[in-house]
Image (cartoon, helix red, strand yellow):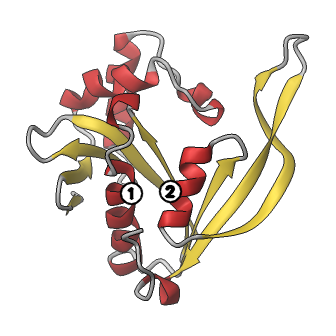
């Protein structure tokens, strides 16, 4: 079981009681890359949470005051010591610094507890909020993949490809970064 505490948040494994909160923000994903996670029914939310409960690198982000889920963090390990990370937050939680606080706690956990050497994130070129979060985390923009991936279609039914930035940070850089920006 994973439990990370920050000043205002608890980052923990998913549990069945998170279904309602997950439904609240995944029934209408705002970023194209999460369209494949769109939930159409509350029953799908329950099933989705049960799947997330099994994955140690899929974590719920909850407010300390009431343990209510406001978002989630996820990582995928690439051997031997690199992790790809991402996040999703409820629109009602934006602008309060929760994403920065949660991501800082999670990256610290991955570096210190999971022995990550390198952590990176893919961010679509129109997802300005996530780009700014990566910058606040001290991640450097390493490149732009032109027409990298398609999550949706154009009006004529052809795939709409998105440009995707890659941001990354190394463990040896993490301890020296000022993440209070």
Residue 116 position in % (x across, y down): 47, 77
Res. 84 visible in picture: no
**Closest to the observer, 77 or 22:** 22
Viewer-nearest residue: 118 or 54: 118
Residue at 48%, 11% in the rendered image: 40
On residue 141, which mark appears? none
Ranked by sequence position, the earlier of labels 2 and 1 is 1
Residue at image position (55%, 27%) is 30
Is 78 on the left or on the right of 63, as rendered? right
Label 2 Cα neighbours within 10 Å, binned few <14 / some 14-19 / many ≥20:
some
Describe residue 157's horizontal placement relative to residue 1 as left or right.
Answer: right
The number of numbered discs placed on residues in the rendered structure image is: 2
Could you classify mark 1 by the number of other residues whose Cα lies within 10 Å: few (under 14), some (14-19), or many (20 or more)? Answer: some
Please name the residue that numbered disc 1 is placed on. Answer: 100
Give the residue number, with chain letter if any, for mark 2.
Answer: 133
Seen from the viewer's position, the closer of residues 49 and 68 is: 68
The quarter of the picture where the C terminus appears is bottom left
Tell me: residue 35, above or below residue 162: above
User: Which element type, helix, strand or loop, lies under badge 1?
Assistant: helix
Residue at left offset 91%, top offset 11%: 156
Farthest residue in the left direction? 65
CB-based contact (under 8 Å), mark 2 and mark 1: yes
The secondary element bearing badge 2 is classed as: helix
The picture places residue 106, in percent across and down from the top left corner, at 36, 63
Is 53 drawn above or below residue 20 in the view shown?
below
For the question of whether residue 92 can be seen, the reply is: yes
Q: Residue 142: percent from the left, percent from the top?
A: 73, 70
Q: Quadrant of the N terminus?
A: bottom left
User: Residue at 50% of width from left, 56% of height from top?
Assistant: 133
- Find the distance from the CA under tag 2 to the CA under tag 1: 6 Å
- Which quadrant holds residue 166? bottom right
Residue 115 is situated, as x and y percent measured from the top left of the image, at: 42, 80
């Amino acid at each position: 079981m994973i439990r990370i505490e920050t000043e205002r948040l608890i980052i923990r494994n998913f549990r069945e009681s998170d279904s309602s909160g997950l439904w609240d923000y995944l029934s209408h994903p705002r970023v194209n890359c999460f369209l494949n996670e769109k939930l159409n029914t509350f029953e799908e939310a329950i099933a989705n949470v049960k799947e997330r409960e099994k994955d140690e690198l899929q974590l719920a982000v909850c407010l300390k005051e009431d343990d209510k889920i406001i978002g989630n963090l996820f990582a995928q390990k690439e051997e031997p010591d690199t992790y790809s990370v991402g996040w999703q937050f409820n629109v009602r939680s934006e602008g309060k610094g929760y994403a920065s606080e949660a991501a800082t706690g999670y990256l610290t956990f991955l570096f210190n507890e999971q022995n990550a050497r390198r952590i990176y994130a893919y961010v679509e070129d129109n997802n300005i909020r996530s780009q700014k979060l990566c910058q606040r985390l001290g991640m450097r923009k390493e490149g732009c993949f032109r027409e990298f991936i398609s999550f949706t279609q154009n009006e004529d039914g052809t795939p709409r490809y998105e440009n995707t930035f890659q941001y990354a940070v190394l463990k040896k850089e993490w301890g020296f970064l000022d993440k209070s920006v």
